[in-house]
Image (cartoon, grey):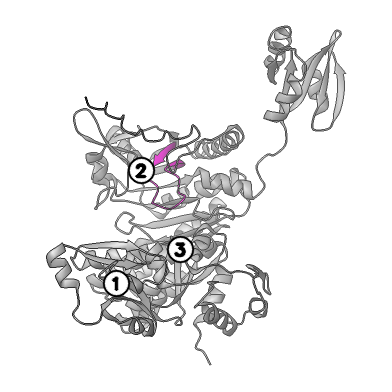
Amino acid sequence: MPLGALFEGSVDALERAGLDVAPLREAGRRLVVGGGNGTTFITTRPSDVPTYVESGAADLGIVGKDVLRERTPDVYELLDLEFGECRMVYATPEGEDPTPAAIEHLGAVRVATKYPVSAIEHFTATGRQVEVVKVNGSVELAPLVGLSHGIVDLVATGRTLRENGLVERERIFDSSARLVANRVSHKLKAAQVDRLVDSLRSPRP
Amino acid sequence: MTEPAAAPPRPEAPPPAALPEGSRDVLAVEAGELTVIERALSGVFDRFGYREVRTPVLELAAVLDRAQEGGLGQVFRLFDDRGRVLVMRPDLTIPASRLIATRMADHPGPVRVSYLSRAFRPPPAGRAAAAEQLQAGLELVGPGGPAADAEALAALVEGLRASGLGDFGVAIADVSLTQAVLDGARVPGEAQAELRRALAERDFVAWRRIAEVLRPPGPAGELLADLPALRGPGALERVAAAVPAAEAACARLGRVLELLAVHGAIDPVMVDLGVLRDWPYYSGVVFEAYAPGAGAPIAMGGRYDGLAARFGRPRPAVGFAIALDLLHRAVVAAGASDRGARPGVVLVGGLEEEVAAAAAARVAGLAVIAVPDEPGWGEALAAADGWRYVARRDGAGYLVHDRLRGVTVACDRLEEALTSAT
């Protein structure tokens, strides 16, 4: 279970699928919570979800496509849960886009991001050189103070970008919450996994 | 006068316990457990008539690169003194195929070879993956039908049973079956490539999206979106009913399952069309084995009828490789590894005064661990290395202490005490 933005949506989705999620709602700061029917919920930061699932410490996980693109864990991506929708974008300050000039004069554009893999992939695929600066928070700050020309970041409504005077220039990919499974659990617990996938997929009221 | 140039700063020497990423030592307890598993596996391979071969760690890159369309990918490469690129073998199927196609080109067949060797792969950045993997596997070259697939699978199942695993599963799919569905549903070539990529990345979301955009008419179209998620009893029937073009492939896989039942190896096996990977490499069945306690498949295999031709001697082939580290992890998780004291006797004075007694006991088949006759030596060594007995001279005979039961018995000769104690 991913803590943070996807947590509520994940709990709701599991509840609609018929799981007893009451213990999860009352978990407080506990990281491991027993659910009904032999289910155990593990809560962790979203970027660690693939690690737990890949190793088999968790059979299943819910995580954003952005994290999967960035980490490329060796797991089964079973289902688009259709919540937590957002997009990975390239954004630069309002006014004239500094990107073409940066590439013309400096050979490369400097981009700050929490997602270096996605950023490098995007600029390489579009034939442009890029210098990626890895930052861990408040990416919007970087172009405002001259650390970079632009940013690659995840955007849901675009409000944070606007408030910081940034403009979306390129859409890189769309993201939403995904159900992922460990390679071994997906086979050894096939019946349980398939049942959950079916009930998560069935049309919602 | 100028100052003498300062010595360039030396890179800090790593501590003596440091090893390259992905490498590790194997100590005595683990090595002993691995040996037990290796013997169990090779016993099974022997009973199917597979003979062990050994290939070199270093191979010519130009030769091994033939095996796969895009070359070998991530491997350790180095140069020899003539500037040729060498690789450390990244798996054992490819070298075994090379060996069979070249050294055994005249063999009447079926060729049955097994191997127990190490393969080397640079660990991906930031992942705790081993650079060195001990693999046990086999190759059956010559026969191309479902009977050969069934034998290879039966040997895998029997091998895993013999290794002490109780609970494990084997999932099986078939490249030609999935291909027949795509062709039967008239999926255009470009979309097929995208679907293949989705399957290789185990991304069922992408597969479904592509399939829903294509939406071929009829029952084949409905089936296509679900295809990688199809598994279990009834999966083959459902495919054959929806896509007549795939009927023959379904019947073929069904025959493999029938024969596995006759082999007595069907219990852990399940059809699962989602296990496909490396599409261009495999040509028929593809399978993986799983066990609780190992987060990744403990064995992988399949049919690769095109591989031998790349080394100049086309012949159908099926085989698999078991990752012994992962299998061992699963055996330990299953509690099947022997955790008791090892049945050896630490003989105080066995290094000098008691050499004759030690030699006699060894002839009788006992492990005798000799230590000098000094205070404290026997017990300390037995505790450190996990030996069950400590013996010391007592008059004309010996006092043998059984550490497992906490009793001491007196006897004339070492062998006696041990046979009576067990």
Is residue B114 visible from the viewing direction of this image? no
Q: Give the crowd class for mark 3: few <14, some 14-19, many >=20 residues within 10 Å.
A: many
Q: Which residue is mark 2?
A: B90
Pinpoint the chain carrying mark 2. B
In this rendering, is residue B295 above or below A49?
above
In this rendering, is residue B321 above or below B183?
above
Tell me where residue B115 sits by quadrant.
top left
Check residue B130 for magenta coloring: yes
Q: Give the crowd class for mark 1: few <14, some 14-19, many >=20 residues within 10 Å.
A: many
Q: Which residues are magenta?
A: B117-137
Q: Which residue is mark 3?
A: A75
Q: Residue at x 32, y 62 (%)?
A: A133
Identify the disc placed on residue A160. none
- A127 left or right, relative to A176: left
Q: Which residue is mark 1?
A: A143
Q: Quadrant of the C terminus of chain B?
A: top right
In this rendering, is residue B384 above or below A12?
above
Outermost residue, left direction?
A: A104
Cα separation, mark 3 vs mark 2, equals 22 Å
Q: Are marks 3 and 2 in contact (CB under 8 Å)?
A: no
Cα separation, mark 3 vs mark 1, equals 35 Å
In this rendering, is residue B209 above or below B146?
below
Give coordinates of residue B180: x percent, y percent.
32, 68
Q: Residue at x 25, y 65 (%)?
A: A110
